[in-house]
Structures are given as C-alpha cells and as structure tokens.
Amino acid sequence: MLIRFRQSRSIKNKSTYASLSKGGPIKSANLKGYCSKGFTLIELVVAMVLLGILSVGVSSFLQFGSQIYADATARDQILSSARFAIERLNRELRASLPNSSRITNDCLEFMPIKASAIYVDIPVSPDSASDKITIVPASTSVSSADIISLNAIVYPVAADDVYLKSNKKFYPIDIVTYSSDPTNVPHTLTLEDSVLFAEESATNRIYFIDDSVMYCIEGSGDNKNLIRYDVTDHSNAGEPLGLTNRAVMAEFLMNSSGFSTNGANLQRNAIVSVRLHFMRLFEEIVFDNEIQVPNVP
C-alpha cells in the first residue's frame, strides 16, 4: 500500500507538472496574485462611504466651532454696546438739571447743566421786574463766555418748569459782567428783558442750561435701536423741536425696552429707570438700571 501511495502521488505530481508546463494554469496563478494587490468594487465603495462619513464629521466639527465663535462675538458686541450706552446715559443723567427728566412716547428727555452758581439776588414777586441777577463769585467756576447766551433757571420743581416758558422759571442771558475783585464783589448777569422769576430757590441755587438731550427707542417689532438726539428748541407747549446730532447708541433692542421716572420726594432724589432688552441670534440679554439724579433745585 505504501508503494502504491507513493506511485499515485508521483503520478499526481507529474500530471500537475505536465499541466503547468502547458502554460494555462501559470497564467491563472499570476492573475490571481495580481488581483490580490488592488481593490475590489466592494472595497472601493466601502472606502468612499467611510471617507464621506469622516469628511461630514470634520466639516460638522469645524462648523460647530465657527458657530461658537460667531455667537461669542455677537454676545460680546451686545455687551459692549449695552455697557457704553448705559454708562453714557448714567453720566449725562447724573449731571442733569433736577426735575428735568420726562418721558414722551418712547423717548427720555432731560436737560444737561452747563454751569451753576449761588445767587445773591434775583427779580421775583413782589419786587419790580428787572434784568439783573447777582451771583456769588466763589460759586462761579466758568468764564463769562461759557454762560453768555444760555438760559438762567431758578427752582425747577417739575418738568414743565424746564420746558415751558410760560412757567417763568428760566430766561436767556444777554450780558455777563464779572467784577474786578472776584473775591468780594458779586458778579452781575444781565438778561435780555426785565423779568420776574416765579419763585426763589430755598438754597439760592441758579443753573445755566442750553439744549436738552433726548434718548429714543426707535424701530419696529423686536429690532429697535437706542438713538440719542440734541434738542435745540421747544414749542410754546414744551414739545421738542429741532432734533439734531442723531447718534445710534445701541442696536438689537426688543419691544420690551423702555424708560420710566420717579420724581424726587422728601426721602430721596429723582430716579430714572432704564430697561434695555437685547436679542441677537436667539440669545437675550436684559439690563435693568436705576439712575439717581443727585442735583436738587
């Protein structure tokens, strides 16, 4: 049996050798080895799918990172504009004339103080009308050029006293005469006409004013802006006229933004409340600020 097994194996090997010598099977073996070095169609499709998934993931990651940066930039822009607007409004209101703040529609109007002093004498009933006002020199820290052509106002206790000429609380200054001895002799202010002030100040304060300032929330819907104006004149009814120097202070305000005022009383000074409600890219930021006006009439 062993001899036969070896013979059959030998014969098999010979037949295999004979068949290989004809060339056909050799070509088939070479082709099989060549194909094993490339990609099949299935492998190519799988590779393309994997590369597509990888590219989508990478692009999504980059897009997500860019969106985070854009949102942070937009948020920082809102915060910066809000801080600037509120700080500007705070400073101007704190230096404004007492009881001059008023709300008209969506606008906050107030009167900045150009200068102030302590007066010695003003024309007030039952005195006769006069165009002269005397002020204490030590209280005057501005030159005559700073207050000439301004309005002198005494004891404003309401907004109408500031904006209505008929209330007889303010009159325009025509001439300013500073004494040669400013330490002892009062300065003299000459008004344009002989007048009578409605009443005296309990603390003899006199303020010098010019144009008022107005902050308005303008726009439609939930896309409004905070606008600042200089008001150069008022009608006989006290309505603002001649809005100039328009400046955008803040953007992206919602409809809930607005102003409110609380007048002064025996316990506290006047307070102006400001609410600025910002929204951008579906992100909301709300600023509620109360500003106290320290000046008194």
Image (cartoon, grey):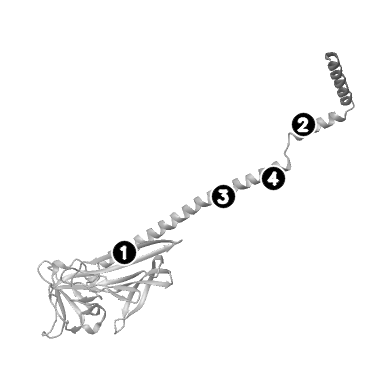
Residue 151, quarter of the rendered image: bottom left
Q: What residue sits right under mark 4 in the picture?
A: 45
Which is nearer the N-term, disc 4 or disc 2?
A: 2
Q: Earlier along the polypeptide chain: callout 4 or callout 1?
A: 4
Q: Gap between marks 4 and 3, in whole Å?
A: 21 Å
Alpha carbon distance from label 3 to label 1:
41 Å
Residue 65 place in picture, x, y as percent = 50, 50
- The Cα atoms of the two marked residues, 4 and 1, are separated by 60 Å
Q: Is residue 171 left or right of residue 283?
A: left
User: Which badge, 2 or 3, is on the more N-terminal residue?
Assistant: 2
Q: Type of residue at label 2?
A: Gly
The amino acid pointed to by label 4 is Val
Local packing at callout 4 (Cα closer than 10 Å; few below 14, some 14-19, many 20+) is few
Residue at which label 3 appears:
59
Residue holding disc 2: 33
- What SS does tag 3 mark? helix
The crowd level at tag 3 (other Cα within 10 Å; few <14, some 14-19, many 20+) is few
For image coordinates 40% across by 60% down, the residue present is 78
Query: Height in image: 73 above or below 90?
Result: above
Q: CA distance from mark 2 to mark 3?
A: 39 Å
Residue 288 numbered tag: 1
Q: Which mark is nearer the camera, 1 or 2?
A: 2
In depth, the one of 297 and 42 nearer the eye is 42
Q: Is residue 68 above or below residue 295?
A: above
- Mark 2, other Cα within 10 Å: few <14 / some 14–19 / many ≥20: few
Number of residue marks: 4
